[in-house]
Amino acid sequence: MIIYLITYSLSFIFSRLGWFLPSGLVLMAGALYLYWKDYRAFGNFIHLRGLFCLFFIGGQALSCLKLSHLQVTWSVITWLSFLAATLSFYFSFALARKWAGPPRQPHWIKKQARGGGPVIPWDRRQELRRYERTLFRAILALTLIASAAFFLEAAILGYIPLFIRNVPHAYSYFHISGVHYFTVSCVLVPSLSVLFFMARDTHHRGRFFAVLVLTLVSLAIPVLCVSRFQLIFAVGMAVFTFLSIKNKFSLRFLFLIAAIMLPAYVVLSIARSHSVEYLNGIFAMKNPAVPIWITQPYMYIAHNYDNFNCLVEQLPSHSLGLRMLFPVLALTGLKFIKPEWALLPIYVTKEELTTLTLIYDAYYDFGIPGVVVFCGVLGVVCALLVRGLERMKNPVGYVVYAQMAMYMALSFFAIWFSIPVTWFYFVVTGMVYVYVEYR
């Protein structure tokens, strides 16, 4: 942590001097160090604290490069907020893990060669097979529900976004309140399929091909919706589910995923009717020669921190909890009874760029104290999940862990815990967990 504080201080000083390149590079070094430190200690590629440090601080480092004309020098309060978020998460995680104590380690735990910590691959194949039929039923039910919800939306709205041309925001309008939650629940199917394929009995070929088809159907729904995020979320969560069990990382596996995802991303970008000229006009890069395949991910990562700075500088008063209570307002229908509670403005540098950081709503509600409390609670929850991973029994628990890992890896992108669909995913996963446990 001392090394991180040194790199953070240097990054702040360099930014104030206008030396943006060294400001970003030195902070990136701090992010990589914290991730490497947790990996070395625990031997876990997707350790939740390591992921948070790598992606939240790493995203901030990219933003410090200031490659777009839209990006400005941040206020001191912005710098203090990002620092408070990291310190609160890091130390609350450490304290919670220390308080919980080391778990009783079953005999199947293996030791990671490089790190000193335990790693739990699920090699108990015979025991995992007990869940094969139950997992199959859960996958079938989820896919049928998501498909029915998708076709219901398409029938009522009268179109499918993939087949609409010259409408850049067709997906944004493809939404029926309440129904869309069930449509996007398809993203949970690939993760459950990973569990099934690892549990399957080779004698049941029919179930194998059935799950393969159901998985393809669940991945087709985001494609038909032209939702790049839902597709990335579904595949990323499946990868994290696999890594949480096996904890093996292969470059060939990474290249295979990239070979599948990159063409899909390009096709969906074209289908969204977002031309290169349109995107370059929005992103306003200082160097217009930077290719769009670099510019677009950079802005989706880096600009969110500038939106947070915009919030800090323009917010007239804190909302005292209304922003983070939005999932309750949405899922209970209170937003229709009290719409003024749900229609709080967001402060962004450009109306087309509305992605936000994980701590945006925490600051919106209570300022820096809100950021400290929010990240402290999140650190405790993540510590308990990491500890639970070390003695997992119910296989669906790996999906819960993978879901939280995705939120940590995308901590630069959205206010995950203020979005109703996040809690809907947790509820659905919890129901599958209970069903598998009961059966």
Image: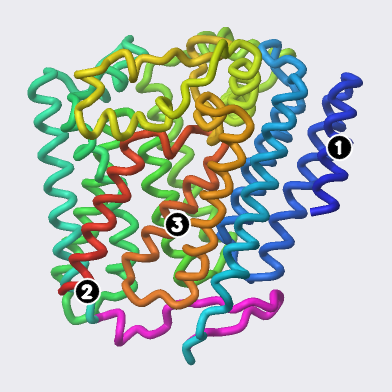
Answer whether residue 114 is magenta in the image.
yes
Region of the chain picked out in magenta, as a range = 108-129
Look at the numbered disc 3 and give the secondary structure of its residue.
helix
Three-letter code for the amino acid on which mark 1 is drawn: Ser
Please give left or right for residue 429 compared with residue 245 in the image: left
Is tag 2's residue or tag 3's residue first in the polypeptide sequence? 2
> In the rendering, which numbered label is found on residue 9?
1
Q: Is residue 28 above or below residue 155?
A: below
Crowding near the residue tagged with mark 3, few <14, some 14–19, many ≥20 C-alpha atoms within 10 Å: some
Q: How far from the left and from the top, in percent, is residue 68?
A: 69, 16
Q: How far from the left and from the top, in percent, is residue 273?
A: 38, 15
Q: Is residue 13 above or below residue 395?
A: above
Q: Residue at x 47, y 63 (%)?
A: 385
Report the front residue among 388 and 273.
388
Quadrant of image for the N terminus = bottom right
Crowding near the residue tagged with mark 1, few <14, some 14–19, many ≥20 C-alpha atoms within 10 Å: some
Report the front residue among 244 and 209.
244
